[in-house]
Image (cartoon, rainbow, N blue to C red):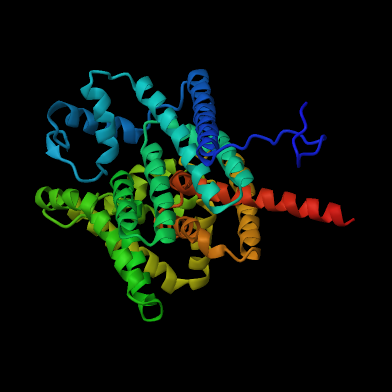
Amino acid sequence: MEHYPGRPLTAQPEPIKLSGKMNAGRQARTSCKLAMFIVISALSIRLAYLFLFNGPTISADAKYAFIPLAHSLATDMSYAKSGRPHIKREPLYPFFLSLFFRAGDNNLWVIKITQCLLGGVLCLIIYLLAKRLFDPPVALGSAALAAIYPPLIYTNVDIATETLASLFLAGFVISWVIARETGTPRHWLLAGMLLGLTTLTRAATQFLPGLLLLSAIYSWPGKGIRQLRLTACLLAGFMLIVGGWTARNLMVGKGFVLVSANGGKSLFQGSRPEFILSGFEKYMGPQAGENKLPLKGLTEVEADRLLQRAALANLAQQARENPLRFTGFMLRKFLRLWYATSSGRWERQLLLLNGSLLILALAGLYFKWQGGRLNSISPLIIISLYFAALHTLAFPLNRYMVVVMPYVIILAANGLWGGYQYYQLVRHNQ
């Protein structure tokens, strides 16, 4: 080895440094591989369940509503049932089914396999959302928990709205988080459009834009008009998607219905104490109390409004007669949201599973609060509380909470990670 002036004989060759572009490329490839691993893992679990157990049986909603409506759309693009324009169900899921029927494939297995793939995509969005808000281990833990969470797997192999609703809602939440960070109107507009797609799949989210607008108006004096303008962008994006369907409902339903005219029935059933008992299906039919209402001859819109008024009257009467019993009634409804099934089966297992996740989620909230960054995860908190409050008022069924369980899972994963870090700290200090 030749010796040059000024260079020590023991000098070693300098390590080759990767350029910023090469390093970015390596990170992109790693991220792409991880994304594929998350989707494929979740897809494999769902396909295993589908082929081993053949999925759940077809529900009454699928047999008498979603599938007939999808066939109607596939045949002549009319959203009708028995030849009459339909207004009781949200349109996006039947339209999704109609894409398969229009292609000449009436095999429900193909639809279920596609939904399993969408379930894998949902796990990826959960990972990306958690990575944006928490540490990388929390993101991986969130994706893993979502991949094996039984209710999400079950709904992916069912002919029901939960798969699409969960996917669109997750897209809205991550877009909402990004919009809050950037403060860019186009991001708020995109978030509103994704919320509109969610609402056309599950109408439960139809009140959220109005609540956010009211919140912005309330905070206007202190925070200025900027937040109000951004929320208006969200509302504009929402109406851009939903507005056309609302106009269609106005023409065919002879009354204003934003998305669907089925909320009154759920609200009415939820106002009756027998529906919070285990296995409420046995109370359906004549015992449901609807036969006592003058519904015959009414349009779907008129019947829905009558059921809403009767439900509110039921709740008001119970509150006046015995406020303490009414409070207990509402508390039981809230608790049953986390485990109640229509058949009464699997309730103990769901109580154990979701109860454990809720405890861990509360711990995750505490650790985030300790770090002084609770405001960054307010979208997760708001959407979870919104669904819990809405369905506590309307109808206590765990199926309705499945679409927001990903955000409970993310908080639970943070609770696990925070507990592990605390354990390591205590062990280090001993």
Task: Compare residues 313 and 421 and report the one nearer the observer.
Answer: 421
Quadrant of the rendered image containing residue 67 = top left
Residue 229 drawn above or below residue 402:
below
Along the line of sight, the residue nearer the viewer: 16 or 414: 16
Asked whether 321 or 168 is in front, the reply is: 168
x and y percentages locating residue 392 in the rendered image: 45, 58
**Residue for point 52% across, 19% down:** 52
Residue situated furthest right in the rendering: 430
The x, y position of residue 220, in whole percent, is: 36, 77
- Measured as percent of width and height from the top left, residue 151 is found at 51, 37
Q: Is residue 277 above or below residue 374?
A: above
Q: Where 315 falls versus 187 (above or below)?
A: below
Horizontal side, residue 420 vs residue 178: left or right:
right
Instruction: Look at the image and tell me whether residue 68 can be seen.
Output: yes
Q: Along the horizontal axis of the image, is 86 left or right of 312?
A: left
Residue in the picture at 38% in, 69% down:
317
Which quarter of the figure is the C terminus placed in?
bottom right
Residue at figure coordinates x 36%, y 47% from the top left: 287
Report the residue that reaches farthest toward the front: 5
Q: For residue 302, which quarter of the picture?
A: bottom left
Pick the quarter of the image with the N terminus: top right
